[in-house]
Amino acid sequence: MVRVVSSRTVKPPPRPRERIELTSWDVSMLSTNYIQKGLLFAPPADPTLLVVDHLAAALTDVLAEYYPVAGRFFTDKHRDDRGDVVGCSVSIDCNGQGVEIIHAVADGVAIADAIPPDADVPPVVRSFFPLDDAVNYDGHDAPLFVAQITDLTDGVFVGFAYNHALSDGTAFWDFLNAWAEIARSRFLAPAERPRLTRAPLFERWSPDGGVAAPIVLPCADVSEIVERLSPPPLRERMLHFSTESLAALKERARQELLAAGDTAGAAAVTRFQALTSLLWRSITRARGLAPDQETVCRAAVNNRGRLRPALPAEYFGNTIYAIGTEAVRAPELLERGHGWAAGAVGRAVAAHTDAAIRARVAAWMAKPMVYTLTWFDPYGTMMGSSPRFDMYGCDFGWGKAVAARSGKANKFDGKTSLYPGREGDGSMDAELTLTPEHMATLEQDEEFWAAVSPDAPAPVGKA
């Protein structure tokens, strides 16, 4: 259904070769998949605009600033006095090797086919993304970033595959927005084109504040610790939560916390906590866990503003951790109610301080590891991505995206990725992944669906 028309390598302007060491946060991502996110657009109103050429030209310009994205990973082997390999460290070899742009066509596929209302995410969406089964270790040879521009009958899907050991989602969306900013500026005269709003910061963080030393993994070859696992069959739903729905969930949590005497929790509760509570409890109910089975809710949290001193917002690299609530038996989670679960999420977020982050870094340095799907908790839930990412700010010059979607990467039963709602005003979309049997049970959960907002009709026509 999707056929590739062409492929090209895009390189940054020449610059001195440079090596940037990966931190403990980066190295731990080497066995996970590339980030796969994408934006669906109406076609440009100007029929003369050659989308692929337009995006490629702007990509060359943005890579001048984001030059590590065009590099490759390089492994150094560390030896003892006898010459035996005792470990490996990985860095980014910034030598302008380039990124890739693919042009594809989805014959007979329309916008409505890609984002049907109140239905599973269609399998065809996965074919809009490159590097489907790649893990981040593959960035030694594969590009660290690949964009696939797929023509639909009445739209354009721009899918991104981005190496997660290069950076986290915050820096990834900063890169995409910088690319979009330059693409928009190309419609202006050269003298009128502004400089990038925010330039990336590549200096690596280290716990002592000094120059970041190479992170040495205790293996003779990094490939030894990389796993390539396939998840079981999964269903995905993109669920919309309006501003009003989220406000109601938050108020319900606040009232329950007040009734329980937790005034501090009630005062601090957020829309994120309330939505996470709904998902945690609803997924747990759908799974029908044994009475003595414990469950934990985890969420990916940005460390930048929690470190002391804080890392700048422009820090380019990974600096996230998955925080977790206290473990609770499944029946108790359901009995304690929406407010208690929201408060538990809030307590986990509040406990993620500078001291807690540094303790986790020290523990990792004492026993280095990489994340794989074997770390997946079949009884817990995981909240990823963020509604704070400026996904709909990525206007490449012909209008705001119609929808945001993702590929099959980094998904498992109980994983939810949060997106900003297209209409803004604090609305959110939740991309929920479950096994078919768990999703079928959830679809009968009246409490859950009472909070889900109807899908807004997709904008149609040219941008």
Image (tube, grey):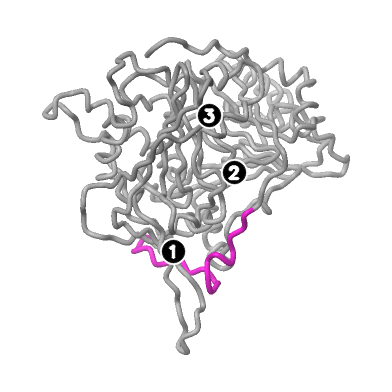
State if disc 1 and disc 3 touch (CB < 8 Å): no
Q: How crowded is mark 1: few (under 14 residues within 10 Å), some or many (20 or more)?
A: many
- Where residue 282 sits in the image (x, y, percent)? 74, 28
- Residue type marked 3: Arg
What is the C-alpha distance between the residues marked 3 and 1?
Answer: 31 Å
- The disc, 3 or 1, on the residue closer to the chain's N-terminal end is 1
What is the C-alpha distance between the residues marked 2 and 1?
Answer: 22 Å
State if disc 1 and disc 2 touch (CB < 8 Å): no
Residue 162 badge = none
In the rendered image, the residue lying farthest to the left is 191
Q: Give the range drawn in magenta.
A: 209-228
Query: Residue at image x 64%, y 28%?
Result: 263
Q: In this view, does 307 lie above or below 381?
A: below
Q: Residues within 10 Å of mark 2 (few under 14, many from 20)?
A: some
Seen from the viewer's position, the closer of residues 345 and 47 is 47
Q: In this view, does 15 lie above or below 437?
A: below
**Could you say whether the residue bearing mark 3 is in a helix, strand or loop?**
strand
In the rendered image, the residue lying farthest to the right is 291
The residue mark sitting in front, 3 or 1, is: 3
- Where residue 338 sits in the image (x, y, percent)? 72, 26
Query: Residue at image x 56%, y 22%?
Result: 114
